């Protein structure tokens, strides 16, 4: 946990702010000059004490009655209530402060070592090697490889078979996998169709890396948004694009780790294929949307087919799917646009007409807003 600011609200359980030393004119004042960055003890005074910073910046550690250690930035005078357990360490510099007290100090040993060092990230992408978006046919096969860095794969289309240290994994459309360093792996298409995938190689420190390494997981909406940003930054190549990719990659690692830790890894593709739900009405509604995606789809018509009120169906769908019916229809229709572009049989104007867009221009605007590239750019990426 990072440092908290000392203010009247978040410090009220432990003490108060002090403007002057006047109330402690009769107290004993001792100057402390510390450069020790670690401790396993806390202090406790029977009566209130005053802390007056003189030089440098300190960290004020306070243990609350429930045993939690709170960290505050000590940059102003504060009064610590009697009975509160605390200690002070310098914050990346030499620290001097004056402590006013009217009672004796009791030293309390603790089992946890407290340190004045700053926060060190648990996940840190240190080096970025390559960002590649690849389109391969059904015969794609990559020879066995082993390297000292991480490799990330997101499969946008098709199915891939990966072998890691002799164990085979099926990677489906919408899934991603992180190959850990020094693990022998092989990648190939399943032979049933072409594939497209994002490949990122990088190096860094990942605490609890075993939680995400070498396991296929579906990308949820948060992950998909970050993946799209990585592709966009790499394609547009603006100033500090690689730095932004490193930041995005770190965020992606955190989200995937959180999902795995919380056991909230999704078991379907959120925006790419039909989702699975445990409600028969919503399931039938989804079927109707996919079966009639080239027609005009309205909430009243869907509700009428299911013998439900539009407001109830709308609320139920949003609760089960996590997005509104109109947004789901929009995403499914855009996925259909991608499929039709990949077929190569239709112009953008024809696709717009078939799928019921008001104009090719509007289709292009919606497509670029969702995928960060125009339909023409997407078509070129498939060649």
Image (cartoon, grey):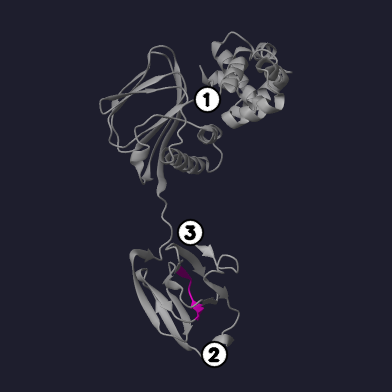
Q: Which mark is residue 57?
A: none
Which sits earlier in the primary sequence, circle 2 or circle 3? 3
List the residue tagged with mark 3: 2
Instruction: Check the image and name the residue furthest to the bottom.
Output: 26
Circles 1 and 3: CB atoms closer than 8 Å: no
The spot of residue 220 in percent (x, y) is 50, 32
Q: Position of residue 318 (x, y in %)?
A: 62, 30
Tag 1 residue: 278
Q: Earlier in the sequence, mark 1 or mark 3?
A: 3
For image coordinates 65% across by 13% down, the residue present is 294
Q: Quadrant of residue 185?
A: top left
Q: Secondary structure at mark 2?
A: loop
Q: Is residue 234 left or right of residue 208?
A: right
Tell me the magenta residue range. 48-61
Cα gap from disc 2 to disc 1, whole angstroms = 70 Å
Q: Read off the residue under disc 2.
A: 25
Q: Where is residue 354, by image quadrant?
A: top right
Please state the horizontal and vertical placement of residue 288, each as a whole percent of the image.
62, 15
Provide the major secondary structure of the magenta segment.
Answer: strand
Q: Is residue 376 visible?
A: no
């Amino acid at each position: 946990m990072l440092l908290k600011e000392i203010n009247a609200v978040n410090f009220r359980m432990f003490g108060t702010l002090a403007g002057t030393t006047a109330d402690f004119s009769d107290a004993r004042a001792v100057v402390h000059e510390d450069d020790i960055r670690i401790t396993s003890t806390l202090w406790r005074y029977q009566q209130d004490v005053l802390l007056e910073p003189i030089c440098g910046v300190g960290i004020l550690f306070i243990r609350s009655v429930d045993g939690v250690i709170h960290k505050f930035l000590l940059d102003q005078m504060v009064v610590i209530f009697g009975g509160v357990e605390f200690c002070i360490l310098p914050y990346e510099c030499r620290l001097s402060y004056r402590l006013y007290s009217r009672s004796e100090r009791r030293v309390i040993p603790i089992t946890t070592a407290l340190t004045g060092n700053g926060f060190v990230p648990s996940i840190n992408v240190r080096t970025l090697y390559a960002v590649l978006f690849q389109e391969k046919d059904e015969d794609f096969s990559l020879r066995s490889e082993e390297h000292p860095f991480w490799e990330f794969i997101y499969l946008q289309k098709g199915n891939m078979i990966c072998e890691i240290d002799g164990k085979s994994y099926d990677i489906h459309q919408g899934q991603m996998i992180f190959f850990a360093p020094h693990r022998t792996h092989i990648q190939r298409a399943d032979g049933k169709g072409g594939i497209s995938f994002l490949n990122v190689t990088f190096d860094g420190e990942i605490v609890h890396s075993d939680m995400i390494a070498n396991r296929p997981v579906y990308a949820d909406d948060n992950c998909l948004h970050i993946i799209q940003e990585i592709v966009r930054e790499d394609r547009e190549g603006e100033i500090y694009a690689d730095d932004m990719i490193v930041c995005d990659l770190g965020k992606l690692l955190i989200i995937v780790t959180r999902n795995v830790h919380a056991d909230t890894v999704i078991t379907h593709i959120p925006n790419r294929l039909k989702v699975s739900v445990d409600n028969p009405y919503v399931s039938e509604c989804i079927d109707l949307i996919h079966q009639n995606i080239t027609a005009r789809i309205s909430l009243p018509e869907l509700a009428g087919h299911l013998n439900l009120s539009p407001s109830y169906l709308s609320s139920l769908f949003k609760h089960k799917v996590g997005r509104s019916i109109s947004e789901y229809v929009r995403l499914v229709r855009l996925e259909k646009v991608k499929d039709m572009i990949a077929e190569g049989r239709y112009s953008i104007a024809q696709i717009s007409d078939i799928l019921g867009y008001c104009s090719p221009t509007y289709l292009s605007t919606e497509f670029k807003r969702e995928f960060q590239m125009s339909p023409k750019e997407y078509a070129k990426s498939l060649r």
